[in-house]
Amino acid sequence: MTRHLLVPMDDSDPARAALRHALTTFPGAEVTVVHAVDDLEAGYGGDPGMGDVSSSSDPEFFDDVRAAAAEHDASVEPTVLRGTAATAILEYADEADVDQIVIGSDGRAGVSRVLLGSVAEAVTRRSSVPVTIVP
């Protein structure tokens, strides 16, 4: 039985579909929604290692995440992480004792997806817990 789900989130339709899937398929599960911010990719410089970012840097789409959870009479724990997306997601999943990861098929499109690779693919290949990919 799935008790703790991890849903990586960005501002994309596949990520929103993954959240809806998690909330409807696993009612009553603890759902943690994470957004990874890569300092080097974002142009902030500094150490790209994983670490919590202050809650004041919550992206606006977390408001939509909270609203979706409320529609399903669920609560979510939104968290912003630092680091490359796949690495930060996998490290968090291990540290937080996650039972399953539910991830959108891809958050990037076009050339950036080809150049940077697929986060969903990297997470699926390296995860120690089951991964559900939602298109």
Image: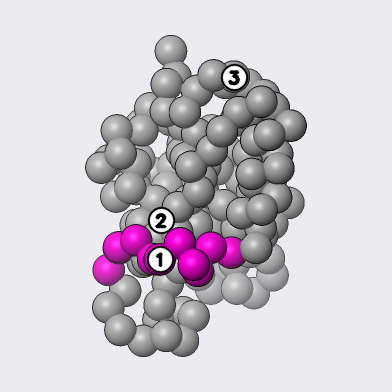
Query: Could you tell me if the residues under marks 1 and 2 are in contact, i.e. CB atoms within 8 Å?
Result: no
Q: Main secondary structure of the magenta part?
A: loop
The amino acid beneath tag 1 is: Ser
CA gap between label 1 and label 3 equals 29 Å
Residue bounds of the magenta highlight: 49-59
Residue 83 visible in image:
yes
Considering every residue shown, the one lying at the far front of the view is 56
The amino acid beneath tag 2 is: Ala
Disc count in the image?
3
Q: Which residue is mark 3?
A: 27
Q: Residue 112 is drawn in which quadrant?
A: bottom right
Closer to the camera in the image, 73 or 50:
73
Closer to the camera in the image, 48 or 68:
68
Q: Which of label 1 and label 3 is nearer to you?
A: 1
Q: Which residue is mark 1?
A: 54
Taking 4 as reference, is 18 above or below it? below
